[in-house]
Image: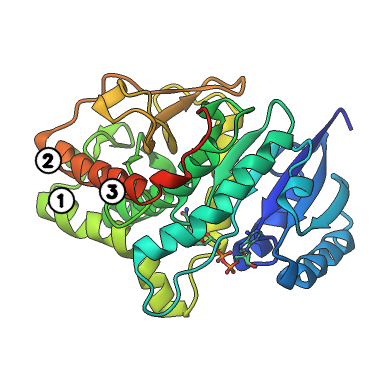
Amino acid sequence: MKKEIRVAVTGAGGQIGYSLLFRLASGEVFGHDTGVHLHLLELPAMINSAQGVAMELEDCAFGNLLSVNCFDQAADAFRNVNWALLVGSKPRGPGMERNDLIKVNGGIFVEQGKALNKASSDVRIVVVGNPCNTNALIAMHNCREIPAERFTAMTALDENRSKAQLAKKAHMSVGDIKKLAIWGNHSATMYPDFENATMAGKSVTDVIKDKTWLETDFIKIIQQRGAEIIKARGKSSAASAAEACIDHVKNLNKKTEEGDWFSCAIPSNGKDYEIPKGLIFSFPVRSLGNGSYEVVKGIHLSDFARTKIKATTDELLAEREVIKDMLAGSN
Ligand code: NAX
């Protein structure tokens, strides 16, 4: 192996973990010349589940998998890792308000943010566990050693869902769709920006002429897709979430092709598109291929888009208010 990489996955005994871990070990994500050490973090009460997954990972005899270790303490699991994929969090219980969930999960990300100080100096963090933008904000504030821009939250699933729906509507291939960005929060207020996306080089609005469908049905389908999947399967999205997490890591790792961008929730610098500084906000992003990325500048936003972006910004500001006591630290 030319290189070795350490990857922590939290919630490793859960359903996304089960779809994600095997692909991380297979060479698909980090390359077939990179040996992978997996650090599986679970709650002490669920550690058996992670251990079962670890046994199955061994049984796959992946050539790239150098080691698998299970942990029930974040500070142990994050030691020297190059990537931390923070998937584990508590689901909303019956009768639980969203703000209660934000607070309950916030505690997890205070602890995990502190534990990330033990990670490798080049660590990059992806928060999947919901509410992922605000959880990433909490982790970022509680981690003094890691630069803020390394903290990201996942909106790639929303982007993939958007591309799939547009492709279906226009009888085109998903691969024909470029520049599809999700703006804002990974929640029902997110804005899938069809106005700046292209299909086979043409503007989406030139291909799909039904403006009402784009402005209402399409946005609603994407915003409600997670809830629809829970209704249909009785469980939340898992394999598609794992696929999106893999896309997120790959997108950050490789230079973005000309004429495209991807969606990634990152700390706002307070300048781009007038989004308040510090919010973990999903923007159209391009990777520079060397571990860094930049927000795509100069995208035209219509009044319609601005109204939607304001709604999702307001929701993120309200979430930040709920957990403001958890925002210690320097970032
Ligand atoms: P599961 O309930 O199947 O698994 C979560 C696992 O996390 C459990 O095994 C639990 O024991 C573990 N866990 C809880 N607290 C932990 C902690 N402090 N440290 C380590 N492990 C811990 O959920 P799953 O379906 O895997 O979903 C995981 C998270 O992803 C949820 O918060 C879910 O809402 C979120 N999602 C985020 C998506 C996104 O696009 N950002 C989409 C899919 C998914 O809904």
- Residue type at tag 2: Phe
Q: Nearer the viewer, mark 3 or mark 1?
A: 3
Asked if the beta carbon under badge 3 is closer than 8 A to the nearest atom of ligand 1, the reply is no
Residue at image x 71%, y 44%?
28
Residue under label 2: 304
Residue under label 3: 318
Q: Quadrant of the N terminus?
A: top right
Disc with the residue nearer the chain's start (2 vs 1): 1
Residue at image x 56%, y 30%?
150
Location of residue 73 in the rendering, given as x and y in whole percent from the top left corner: 75, 54
Left or right: 248 as drawn, with respect to 223: right
Residue under label 1: 215
**In the rendered structure, are the residues bearing label 2 and label 1 in contact, judged by CB atoms less than 8 Å apart?**
yes
Asked if the beta carbon under badge 2 is closer than 8 A to the nearest atom of ligand 1, the reply is no
Disc with the residue nearer the chain's start (3 vs 1): 1
* Secondary structure at numbered mark 3: helix
Left or right: 127 as drawn, with respect to 114: left
